[in-house]
């Protein structure tokens, strides 16, 4: 979808207008005289990550060899809100940029990314795409504005060794918040570790509270009259129930330890050091535990997101490849083809998937950690089986997660100003975990008041 274009045409001929449009395009001209189309792909790994850069460049070269009429230019640009707005306004946005799921609603509303509904239909196995995985890329109008490249779903990461020391079964991690509370208390009483810990800093407090609210069967924002509004502060909300659960573990059970100020890096470090029994995180934490922190693969487990009641919901996140609204039809076609080749082919081609897994294993990656399937079982299951042939981690440790993921509803992050909502909620979570007299309902009302105007302005 193109943004509306208003240009004073006085004294401008039709030919001159074509030149104006071509020069203002951030993606280059339509096509060269010989039919060659040029697109710019962002996200090239930095030179400091030599292995990733080598793989990236090899794949780009492979694509260009197979598609000699498509010329690829690459750069290291990574999405952030401010620079993206500047690039769009100045006409310098790369043809392909990957953005967080949380940004999609705003980008669609502002018409800052292209409508890819028709382009998606040209991709291999487009009809086999998992509707749940594709959902975050769709606008309210039902059209498709991006192509998912990575998705994750949060679960319970736990230390199997601490479970055994506490007399718990490491093959049967907690599946409800009541069971988490019981297990956390046992770990705290029978070992030197903190039973359960939760991220609270740098927007992670709000992020994890949102995940908990979803697991309590609730949402954080709801739509009314065509606009979204925060609902996490209403009486009896999932967010309030979540904070009360955390308060009970922290102050009644004393199973959350003394340190309540952790970001994701702090959490990974403390967990990897054996100081924490359980936390909520994505499967990527398993890889970090093994690769960055040299943790023993046998000691880490991954379970399904604990829930409250019969509703099985967990928070999903990830990245979506979007295309510049200034891209021509030929550039969109070329960009979609590259996205399919680079990001999706290993998700639907079992042979490529195993080859990719073998290469990553050679570079020291953890292979066998569960992922959200992008395609329906007929496509996804053979791919997963091929990857598992290269597994260098005990995939049985993650069975409580992978065997139940299909039963869960994957709820995306709040659609409007998610990061600012998370930032406001950080204070609420920190207050409840650091002050015994902090009232969950009161803290949520404060957070809602703090971010209310931002959510409203984002929709005007």
Image (cartoon, rainbow, N blue to C red):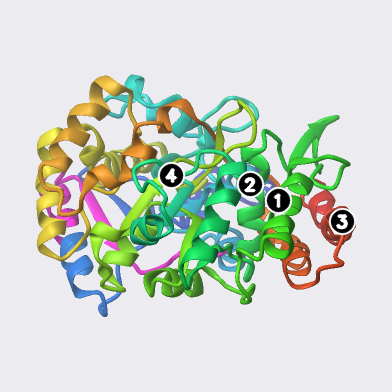
- Is 228 left, or right, of 155 in this rendering? right
Residue 414 in sight here? no
Q: Quadrant of residue 176?
A: top right
Rendered position, 47 above or below 366: below
Residue 60 in sight here? yes
Sequence order check, earlier mark of 4 and 1: 4
Region in magenta: 58-80
Tell me the SS state at disc 3.
helix
Q: Position of residue 253 (x, y in %)?
A: 67, 60
Asked if residue 135 lies in the magenta stretch, the reply is: no
CA gap between label 4 and label 1 equals: 18 Å
Q: Which residue is mark 4?
A: 173
Q: Which residue is mark 1?
A: 245
Pointer 2 local density, CA inside 10 Å: few below 14, some 14–19, many at least 20: many
CA gap between label 2 and label 1 equals: 10 Å
- Labels 2, 4: front one: 4
Sequence order check, earlier mark of 2 and 1: 2
Sequence order check, earlier mark of 3 and 1: 1
Q: Which residue is mark 2?
A: 212
């Amino acid at each position: 979808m193109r943004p509306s274009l208003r240009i004073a045409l006085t004294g401008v001929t039709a030919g001159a207008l074509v030149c104006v449009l071509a020069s203002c395009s951030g993606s280059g001209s339509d096509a060269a005289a010989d039919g060659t189309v040029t697109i710019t792909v962002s996200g090239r790994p930095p030179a400091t990550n030599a292995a990733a850069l080598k793989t990236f460049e090899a794949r780009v070269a492979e694509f260009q060899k197979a598609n000699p009429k498509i010329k690829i230019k690459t750069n290291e640009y990574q999405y952030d809100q401010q620079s993206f707005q500047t690039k769009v306004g100045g006409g310098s946005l790369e043809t392909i940029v990957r953005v967080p799921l949380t940004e999609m609603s705003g980008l669609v509303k502002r018409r800052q990314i292209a409508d890819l509904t028709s382009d998606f239909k040209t991709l291999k196995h487009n009809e086999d795409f998992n509707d749940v995985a594709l959902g975050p890329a769709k606008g309210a109008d039902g059209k498709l504005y991006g192509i998912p490249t990575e998705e994750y779903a949060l679960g319970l990461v736990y230390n199997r060794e601490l479970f055994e020391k506490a007399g718990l079964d490491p093959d049967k991690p907690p599946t409800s918040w009541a069971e988490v509370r019981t297990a956390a208390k046992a770990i705290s009483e029978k070992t030197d570790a903190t039973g359960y810990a939760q991220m609270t800093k740098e927007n992670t407090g709000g992020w994890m509270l949102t995940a908990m609210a979803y697991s309590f069967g609730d949402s954080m924002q709801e739509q009314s009259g065509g606009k979204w509004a925060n609902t996490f502060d209403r009486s009896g909300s999932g967010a309030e129930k979540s904070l009360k659960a955390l308060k009970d573990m922290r102050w009644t059970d004393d199973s959350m330890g003394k340190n309540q100020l952790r970001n994701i890096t702090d959490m990974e470090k403390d967990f990897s050091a054996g100081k924490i029994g359980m936390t909520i995180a994505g499967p990527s934490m398993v890889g970090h535990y093994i690769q960055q922190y040299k943790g023993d693969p046998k000691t880490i487990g991954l379970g399904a997101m604990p829930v409250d009641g019969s509703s099985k919901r967990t928070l999903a996140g990830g990245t979506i490849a979007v295309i510049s609204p200034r891209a021509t039809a030929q550039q969109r076609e070329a960009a979609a083809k590259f996205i399919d080749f680079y990001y999706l082919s290993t998700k639907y081609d079992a042979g490529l998937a195993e080859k990719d897994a073998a290469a990553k294993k050679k570079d020291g990656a953890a292979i066998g950690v569960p992922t959200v399937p992008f395609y329906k079982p007929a496509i996804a299951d053979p791919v997963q089986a091929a990857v598992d042939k290269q597994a260098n981690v005990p995939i049985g440790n993650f069975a409580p997660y992978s065997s139940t993921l299909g039963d869960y509803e994957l709820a995306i992050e709040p659609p409007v100003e998610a990061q600012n909502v998370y930032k406001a909620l950080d204070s609420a979570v920190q207050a409840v975990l650091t002050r015994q007299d902090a009232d969950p309902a009161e803290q949520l009302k404060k957070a809602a008041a703090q971010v209310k105007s931002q959510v409203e302005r984002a929709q005007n």
